[in-house]
Image: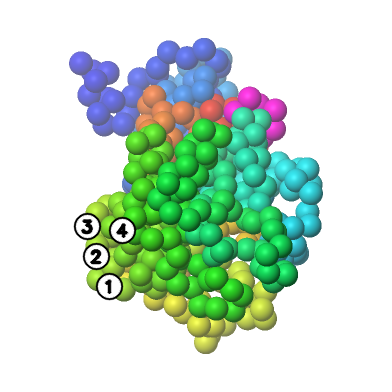
Amino acid sequence: MKALCALMLGIATPLLAAGPATLLRPDRVFDGTAVHPGWEVLVEGERIAAVGPHLATPAGARVIDLPGDTVMPGMIEGHSHLFLHPYNEASWDDQVLHEPLALRTARAVVQARATLMAGFTSERDLGTEGAGYADVGLKQAIDQGIVPGPRLLVAARAIVAEGAYGPKGFEPGVKVPQGAQEVSGVEEMVRAARDQIAAGADVVKMYADYHYMPKEPSRATLTQAELTAGTATAHDAGRLAAVHAATAEGMRRAIAAGVDTIEHGYGGTAEIFRAMHDKGIALCPTLAASDAVSRYRGWNGQDPAPPAVEENVKSFRLALAAGVAMCVGGDVGVFTHGQNSREMVLMQRAGMTPIQVLTAATSGNARIFHLTDVGALRPGLLADIVAVAGDPTRDVTAVGDVRLVIKGGTIVRE
């Protein structure tokens, strides 16, 4: 009975574990929803054994004192592209068309490690952008301990309406390799979704809208029937459905299809975000992507912000006011992997409290992505743990100063 009560309070007696114990003693613990000054975390084997104040130190345990630091769950990156690198280094077209798959894979391995070292111990990667199913292999390499990296949820090849993606700008009729799988019609959508799932995708990623030709505005591309069919196929297979939608009509179709997350949402209105809230659909606002691209084009970060940044912040605030669940996902790959916390800083700047941002990046993303073993500091969960300097519950920029990273009970950065 005593052990049961302790578990309910989040202050537990140690669980049985195979490996040696590690006791973390920071100034405070953020457990995924709230901050607790003076708490400690005990790790045994690959899992958290106890969380609370004044924990007993098991015989032979290693004690790590972290004065001034905050211990928190490993953060979860919600929107990334490990097979892309910053667009000021090479354009998207050049990466898709001219960089060999082996080069892109080697770079992705390095970028996965950088993400883990930045304290992001899980990551949803939303499309290889022309690199086929290489993300499935990278996930396997990480899971098998061949290379270091976060726990991955992968989407393999995203799905787009025929003719509505890129690269573009070649002789009409010439077949150019595309950054995603093209479909036309419900049957092709279902087949494409099943292709991704059979290859090992955890997420079916679809583009509700895009532009048919360069410099055209985005417009709805996949039909309502196609989006609904792709979402149903994903859900029937126990997979998530994520949808790129930057226009109001694209968002309406995604909401009607019952997707799990909408990516970007720049064209959202108060009405649309209320509908998202009512259907339990989360938003990945990708504030850092519009910020980074604007900086590449010469913006110095000062007011007045470029229209793309203003539109993104406006839609984010509308979603926040509607109570939409917020995914932390910066579209990393547009900017440098390992700088994932840029999205969190911008979310705070745009109106979320530090606690709200930290919750979204940990237990919030875990809930949205149906990850039941990570995202919080509770006895029995996997010991994916980060220590950062200072107090991110007062200013989230502190998460950029990582002191310790533990993944599955193993210290990977100290």
SS category of the residue bearing label 2: helix
Q: Residue at x 38, y 54 (%)?
A: 227
Residue annotated with mark 3: 278
What residue type is disc 2 on? Arg
SS category of the residue bearing label 4: helix
Judge by depth and name the residue closer to the eye, 375 or 26.
375
How far is mark 1 from mark 4, CA to CA?
A: 14 Å
How far is mark 1 from mark 2, CA to CA?
A: 6 Å
- The earlier-in-sequence mark between 1 and 3 is 1
Check the image and name the residue furthest to the front.
173
What residue type is disc 3 on? Asp
SS category of the residue bearing label 1: helix
Judge by depth and name the residue closer to the eye, 281 or 319.
281
Residue 318 x %, y %: 32, 71
Q: Nearer the viewer, mark 4 or mark 2?
A: 4
Q: Which quadrant is the C terminus positioned in? A: top right
Judge the density around disc 3: few (<14), some (14-19), many (≥20) Cα neighbours within 10 Å. few
CB atoms of marks 1 and 2 within 8 Å: yes
Residue annotated with mark 4: 255
- The image quadrant that residue 14 belongs to is top left
Residue annotated with mark 2: 274
Image disc number at residue 172: none
Q: Which quadrant is the N terminus positioned in? A: top left
Residue annotated with mark 1: 270
SS category of the residue bearing label 3: helix
Residue 56 x %, y %: 42, 21
Question: Which secondary structure type mostly characterizes the magenta part of the structure?
Answer: loop
How far is mark 1 from mark 3, CA to CA?
A: 12 Å
Colour treatment of the image = rainbow
